[in-house]
Image (cartoon, coloured by chain):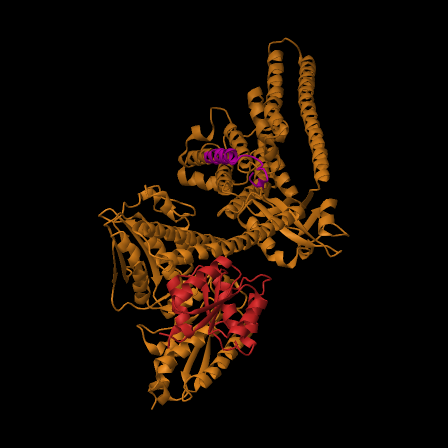
Amino acid sequence: MSSSARKILVIDDDQDLVRALGTRLRAEGYGFVAAGDGVMAIAAARREHPDLIILDLGLPGGDGYQVLGRLKTLMPTSSTPVIVLSAKDPKVHEERSRAAGADAFLQKPAENAALMAEIRRQLGES
Amino acid sequence: MNGIRSPERSTHAWSRNLIGAGRVASLAVIAVGVLVLVGWLLDLAALVRVGEGFPGMNPLSAACLVLGGLATWLLADGPEGRHARDGRSLALVIAAIGVLRLAAPARLGEPVGRFLASAWGGRPGWVPMAPATAAALLLVGLGLALADARPLGARRWAQALLLAAMAPAVLSVTLYLYGAPFVPVLAFLRPMAIHTAVGVLTLSCAALLIRPRSGAMAIATGDSIGGSMLRFMLPVVVAVPLALGGLSLLGRGRRLYDTSQGAALVATVTAMLLVTGLWSVARRLTHAEAARRRAEQALAESRLRLDLVLRSIGVGVWDYDIGRDAVTFDDTVAEFWQLGGHRPVPMRRVVDHIHADDRAATVAEVRSALGSGNEFAASYRVLRRDGSIRVVTTRGFVTRDPSGRPVELSGILWDTTIQHEAAAARERIQQQQLELKDQFLSHVSHELRSPLTVIFSFVEILLDGLAGGLNEQQREFLTITHRNAAHLRQMIDDLLEVTRAQTGKLVVHVRRLELAPVVTSTIEDLALQANARRIQLAGDIQTDLPPVLADPDRVRQVLVNLLDNALKFTPEGGSIRVTVEPGPGPAEEIVLSVVDSGPGIPADERERIFRQLHQLDCGAPVSRKGLGLGLYICRELVTRMGARIWVEAVPQGGSAFRFTLPVCSPVSAITSLLTPENLERAEFHLLVVTIRPKSRRAWAERDDAAAATVFEVVRHCTSPDRDLVLPRSGANADAESIGVLACAEASDAAVLVRRIDGQLARCEALASARLAWSLSVRRLDVGPVRGQTARDLAGALSSGVEDAFADLDAWRDAA
């Protein structure tokens, strides 16, 4: 039941943020994988079988929603919880992401505590 | 500029004075008549004949003078006066007496005189009525009787008769003046008694004076040059012949010349005087004519100039004769109105050319000007034959008759299509600019958030010791950094909210809300910050508060904003208290207050702090000031929730920021649906939706999860920004099965009901299968809104909701 079994895939093109999230997640005991664009993201998902995906909508090429859609329809990841972490306006995009299958939506910058709590919730941990 | 009134013919006061003089004269005549009659009755010769040897006044004449004076008095009130008919009858009597005397022997009335003589004994000798008197009385009588006859010609004849009546009297007076013998050779030369003559003259004058605006008198009393000439010449024309006659007699008496020489002298002098008079009159008339010609010339010139101006700038002129329903207009206007054919045209044809949408407003504007105004202005569209639409602006003024009734509407019109299009284009551009601004700020804030996220993440990582231990100073510096990053985030959020507020995109999702948990959790969130500055932060929430109708996120936002401000401006060691209690007034509301022990806000700032970009100048450190948007956003949010926010001073010197929230009740729920936009729609319906399980047992056994499901179902089916699930009074779980929705069209209602039904079906599958749901919908008619506030209207409509509750109770309580 150690949380080190849990692997989280972070999809975001912001290298600095990926670095920060990585540090944080590892410190909390999670495995961590990152991808910087849509193609890499799908490939990483297939390869790594993450337990949770954190997705930024503002990917290069503007295909954040496309990636979300594919993640939710492709076999290995269709049941993986996806937390959307985005700088976009939640009033428009929260509904839209949920409709596209996202399990949670957090607006950047998210409180560290809030993000961790959501991760735990989505992984079914207390 | 006032409307134009037709000028009065003569001033009112002047004619009143003349009528007054007429009345006085008629009284004098009555007095003379009465005195003579008294003389006859009481045998006073002095009254009957003025002096020894003079002929006396016949008693019938005296009676006629009394009657005549009375008739004039009665007619003085005017042709429609109460006694006018009586006056005319009296006048006819006088005329009849005159006719009788002229036709009958001189001894008319002698039996009466003899009777009087026998009754009182010892009379002065009988005096017959002179034929001159009879003629005069006849003329006066007819003149008075005809004074108000309908045909204009008759009235002029009446005045001529009255003037003619003066002739015998003037003759008699002249005969006396010239010392003519009393018993002449020719009957008509026998003079009237002197007082008869004077009486008749006065009576005729009185009769003419009481109608100063009729016929010949109008000219005599008028302002015009004719009137003033008449008034100047009349005394001359009367006095001069009399004087000359007298002088010639005097001359003959003194044997300066004999009869024929005297006559020649009189004739010559008269002729010379008349010629002089005539030339003087002609000269004045010529000058007047010249002045008139010059005025006409000037008028023609200014008309030409006006025409030139109007044609050059494309302004048309039109006139509407209200009485004849005829509109005349020039070619420019014909072009605008696209009216060919004959002119003038009836108003109806003009109105037909106004665009249908603008017709009612334009007609209303014209009506109101005709009713009570003087000017009117209107703009309307005209649909032209080639399909294009032009906007026309018209201005006009009303001409009224002396009684105030409108007789004419005159105006101009010109093409303002370009101005209208420019105004519309400006609005479009403004809207576009707001949109662009919104998009820009959205984009900017989005971009700004990403690096901010990185800053937050690493600062938090460092503060949590994940990159190694920290000494005191490092920790302190990192904490400061974190606080400033939070500050930056708040400013970005504020910027975005403000733009949304301005472009109308700021929405609130009101719902039934329990305040206690929201307030408590917000206070907890800020406890850390308060402790860091050793400020006491406490909440004081009254128990048993009814739920409010508000947006929980927004309530939190406002509260956080107010607490943030309080924390900023309260010095270390101070205190902040949050209270939640029912409002004092009749309107059901809850008041939330944030009371701090800071420096307070001066009275003249208390309104301005809610404006954009206002920053308080009270010595708080610069880093704490922010963009100055926070309170502005708070006010926008609170207003959209149907509430108010304000600040008061606290006796101990701090500030109390307070805002209200409406208690959730059917009335407040319906009020929030009656937005101005909704009420202006052509069609607008309110639906009361009741959702309950099909079986009563299931209802009794329902659990919170089921209730929450129902809540969610209704919530998800309503219009995006208003989902309203209604409580009765108090927080009753029953309540969550009744909601009120607003929809703009009947078809929307059907769609909504179908959606709710669909959702209910999903609930059956997802939630407890035992509970099968039933949906009933009741439509509320909003009805006419004139003059009612949204709250009044909501009050009237809330009975629809009460009925739904009653139905639910009835269903539940049925065995």
Residue B793 is at least partly visible in this image: no
- Above-or-below relation of B544 to B122: below
Instruction: Please report the residue visible at 42 percent of the width from the left and 79 percent of the height from the top.
Output: B690
Question: Which residue: 35% across, 61% down?
Answer: B661
| Outermost residue toward the left in this view | B652
B234 to the left or right of B532: right
| Residue B426 on the magenta span | no
The number of callouts visible is: 0
**Does the magenta-highlighted stretch encompass residue B22?**
yes
Corner quadrant of residue B614:
top left
Which quadrant would the N terminus of chain A be assigned to in this image?
A: bottom left
Chain that is red in the image:
A
Q: Position of residue B771 (x, y in %)?
A: 41, 87
Residue placed furthest toward the front: B468
- Residue found at the very far bottom of the displayed protein: B815
- Identify which residue, B152 or B805, lies in the foreground: B805
Asked if residue B266 is positioned above or below residue B625 in the image, the reply reads above
Which quarter of the image is occupied by the C terminus of chain A? bottom left
The chain whose colour is orange is B
**Front residue of B458 and B182:** B458
Image spot of residue B234 (x, y percent): 60, 25
Q: Which of A43 and B673 lies nearest the eye of the viewer? A: A43
Residue B209 makes an appearance in the image: yes
Say which quarter of the image contains residue B733.
bottom left
* Percent x, y of residue B346: 69, 54
Q: Give the x, y percent position of residue B310.
A: 70, 39
In this rendering, position of residue B97 left or right of residue B735: right
Q: Observer-nearest residue: A81 or B7?
A: A81
Query: Which residue sits furthest top?
Result: B256
Q: Is residue B489 left or right of residue B206?
A: left
- Residues rendered magenta in the picture: B1-27
Considering only vertical position in the picture, is B486 above or below B792? above
